[in-house]
Image: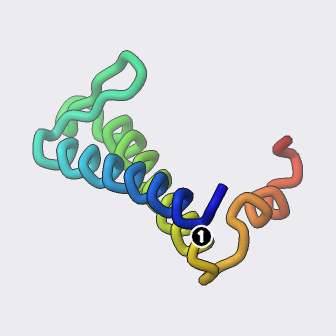
Amino acid sequence: MPPAYQAIIFAMLGLCAIWGIQRNLSSGTASSHGWTCTIDDNPIGFCLIVCGKAVCLGFCVVAILHAFGMVGDPGATIKHALPFLP
């Protein structure tokens, strides 16, 4: 895939993650695959959902930087750091 397309796709995914994080923080509720956590009732679940979206955002940023040649391949780095993953 050409680097420009890769950067555009990951930029759109990153914007979706930013929008989701902002929406969760402003409303105080976070939903993920069938269960909803509010910051008052289940703060740990809420933080886990928001942190999962933040990890997705971080990966999108690294993928965009990789598309422009500023950093190495994030997939190869993760595979090297976690050899038990396929």
> Which residue is at the front of the view, 59 or 33?
59
Give the number of callouts: 1
> Can you name the residue that lies furthest to the left here?
27
> Which residue is at the front of the view, 37 or 13?
13
**Residue drawn at point x = 48 percent, y = 55 percent:** 10
**Which quadrant of the figure has residue 59?**
bottom right
What kind of element bears circle 1? helix
Judge left or right: residue 64 versus residue 31. right
Judge left or right: residue 19 versus residue 84. left
**Residue drawn at point x = 79 percent, y = 62 percent:** 76
User: x and y percent of residue 14 in the render?
Assistant: 39, 55
**Which quadrant of the figure has residue 65?**
bottom right
- Neighbours of disc 1 within 10 Å: few (<14), some (14-19), many (20+): many
Instruction: List the residue tagged with mark 1.
Output: 67
> Can you name the residue that lies furthest to the top here?
34
Q: Amino acid at mark 1?
A: Ala
**Residue drawn at point x = 21 percent, y = 42 percent:** 24
